[in-house]
Image: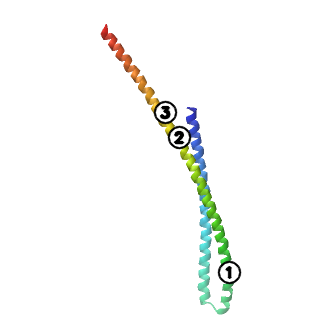
Amino acid sequence: MAKKKDLHTLIRLRKWDVDEKRRALGVHLREEERVLGQMQALEDSLARERAFVASAAPDQRMTFEAFVRRCRAQREMLERQLAEVRARIEVARQHLAETYRRLKTFEITQEQRDIAERKEEAHIEQMGLDEIGLTLFRRKDAGAAL
């Protein structure tokens, strides 16, 4: 009986570990969303500036080139951040998958143990019922022989 309880404890620990890995993955996914949002905001800003420059006076257009250079540099930085975050996401997904596989191994093992235990209990119960039936038959047979 102690082995059964020990395995349930390990299953609870593995479930907790899976939940922790999911939370870590969630953090990375939110970081990816944040970087993608910043990239979209940068693109929107560039589009607004282009629209403004198109209708602006020629002397105001000179600053647009510097703005575009700054946007490119910022986009490159965000692309590097995005690549780093996506690499962390991939690692987190692999860790989660491995942790989940370990959990499933314990759950399947426990399920097999539970089935074997139920079969053993049913077998013992049937043996007891067979013994009772045999005893009653012997008593009835012994009573008829007198």
Determine whether the residue tagged by mark 2 lies in a helix, strand or loop.
Answer: helix
Q: Decide if residue 138 is on the left or right side of residue 24.
A: left
Q: Are marks 1 and 3 in contact (CB under 8 Å)?
A: no
Q: Which residue is mark 1?
A: 69
Q: CA distance from mark 3 to mark 2?
A: 12 Å
Q: CA distance from mark 1 to mark 2?
A: 60 Å
On the image, which quarter does residue 46 sit in?
bottom right
Q: Which residue is mark 3?
A: 117
Residue 146, numbered label:
none
Query: Label 1 crowding class (10 Å Cα cut-off): few <14, some 14-19, many 20+?
Result: few
As drawn, 31 above or below 9: below
Q: Nearer the viewer, residue 139 or 37?
A: 139
As drawn, 80 above or below 18: below
Q: Which residue is mark 2?
A: 109
> Residue sitting at 68 percent across and 91 percent down?
59
> Residue sitting at 54 percent across and 44 percent down?
105
**Earlier sequence position, callout 1 versus callout 3:** 1
Residue type indicated by callout 1: Arg
Q: Position of residue 114 (x, y in %)?
A: 49, 36
Q: Are marks 1 and 2 in contact (CB under 8 Å)?
A: no
**Earlier sequence position, callout 1 versus callout 2:** 1
> Residue sitting at 68 percent across and 81 percent down?
69
Determine whether the residue tagged by mark 1 lies in a helix, strand or loop.
Answer: helix
Residue type indicated by callout 3: Glu
List the single residue furthest toward the top. 146
Residue type indicated by callout 2: Thr
Q: Position of residue 72 (x, y in %)?
A: 66, 78
